[in-house]
Structure formats: structure tokens, C-alpha cells
Image (cartoon, rainbow, N blue to C red):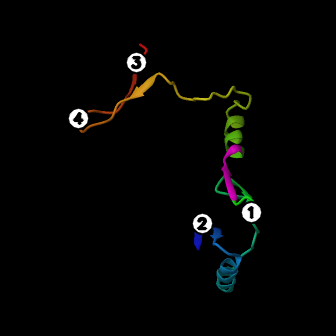
């Protein structure tokens, strides 16, 4: 069983619903709780689950769109590689500070 707790948000995960029911019942005896059902989002992370295919998809699309809108960039052009593909990073050592090295210039 996995129990995630962040401030006043609680997520329970287990191989079977019987285990979740068991821990939920015990927690509800001690704490005032509201069961919101299957997890749809947690900490700005959207969760899409397909029980039949046994898949789980995590996304931050809504959060990213909110950031783009707040900075007036909701109509910006996406890029397959958002970083400059010509910059090569060198491995750092104790006497060398890691910096980007532009091999094109």
C-alpha cells in the first residue's frame, strides 16, 4: 500500500480496493475526511487511468497552459527541442565549473 500525504491532501494506492477500504475506515475514525473518489489530479498533476488496459497517464497540460496564459504566450509556437541543439555540455570536475559551450561559434 502507498499513502501519499501533502498538507491536507491524501492519496491511497494499493493492489486491491479491499486494502484501501480497510485503511480508509481506520483513518475516518481518527480524522474528519471526505472521499473524493478516483484520483483525477494531485499537486497540479492530472491523472488519467484506464483500468481495462491497466494504464496510467500523467500530464501537466493544464498547469503549463495556465503558465503560458499568465505570460501572454498561449499562442506561442511549440518546438520539438526547446533548448538550443548546438550547445554541448561538458562534464564537470572539481576544478572545472560546468557551463554550456556553443560549438557553432
Q: Residues within 10 Å of mark 3 (few under 14, many from 20)?
A: few
Dot 4 and dot 3 residues touching (CB under 8 Å) = no
CA separation in Å, label 4 and label 2: 42 Å
Residue tagged 1:
51
Q: Which mark is residue 95?
A: 4
CA separation in Å, label 2 and label 1: 28 Å
Q: Nearer the viewer, mark 4 or mark 3?
A: 3
Residue tagged 3:
103
Q: Which residues are magenta?
A: 55-61
Q: Quadrant of residue 100?
A: top left
Q: Secondary structure at mark 3?
A: loop
Residue tagged 2:
7
Q: Residue at x 67, y 39 (%)?
A: 67
Pointer 3 or 1: first along the chain:
1
Dot 2 and dot 1 residues touching (CB under 8 Å) = no
Q: Secondary structure at mark 2?
A: loop
Dot 4 and dot 2 residues touching (CB under 8 Å) = no
Q: Residue at x 44, y 24 (%)?
A: 87
Q: Residues within 10 Å of mark 1 (few under 14, many from 20)?
A: few
- Side of 52 where 11 appears, left or right: left
CA separation in Å, label 3 and label 1: 48 Å
Q: Which mark is residue 18?
A: none
The image shows residue 23 at horizontal and vertical percentages of 64, 81
CA separation in Å, label 4 and label 3: 22 Å
The image shows residue 16 at horizontal and vertical percentages of 67, 75
Q: Quadrant of residue 51?
A: bottom right
> In the image shown, does 32 or 97 lie closer to the viewer?
97
Magenta segment, prevailing SS (helix, strand or loop): strand
Dot 4 and dot 1 residues touching (CB under 8 Å) = no
Q: Compared with residue 102, is residue 93 higher up or lower down, i.e. above or below?
A: below
| The N terminus sits in image quarter | bottom right
Pointer 4 or 2: first along the chain:
2
Amino acid at each position: 500500500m502507498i499513502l501519499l500525504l501533502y498538507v491536507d491532501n491524501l492519496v491511497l494506492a494499493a493492489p486491491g480496493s479491499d486494502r484501501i477500504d480497510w485503511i480508509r475506515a481506520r483513518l475516518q475514525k481518527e480524522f474528519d475526511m471526505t472521499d473524493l473518489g478516483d484520483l483525477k489530479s494531485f499537486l497540479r498533476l492530472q491523472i488519467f487511468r484506464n483500468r481495462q488496459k491497466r494504464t496510467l497517464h500523467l500530464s501537466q497540460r493544464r498547469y503549463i497552459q495556465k503558465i503560458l496564459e499568465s505570460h501572454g504566450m498561449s499562442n506561442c509556437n511549440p518546438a520539438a527541442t526547446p533548448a538550443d541543439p548546438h550547445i554541448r555540455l561538458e562534464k564537470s570536475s572539481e576544478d572545472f565549473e560546468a557551463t554550456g559551450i556553443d560549438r557553432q561559434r
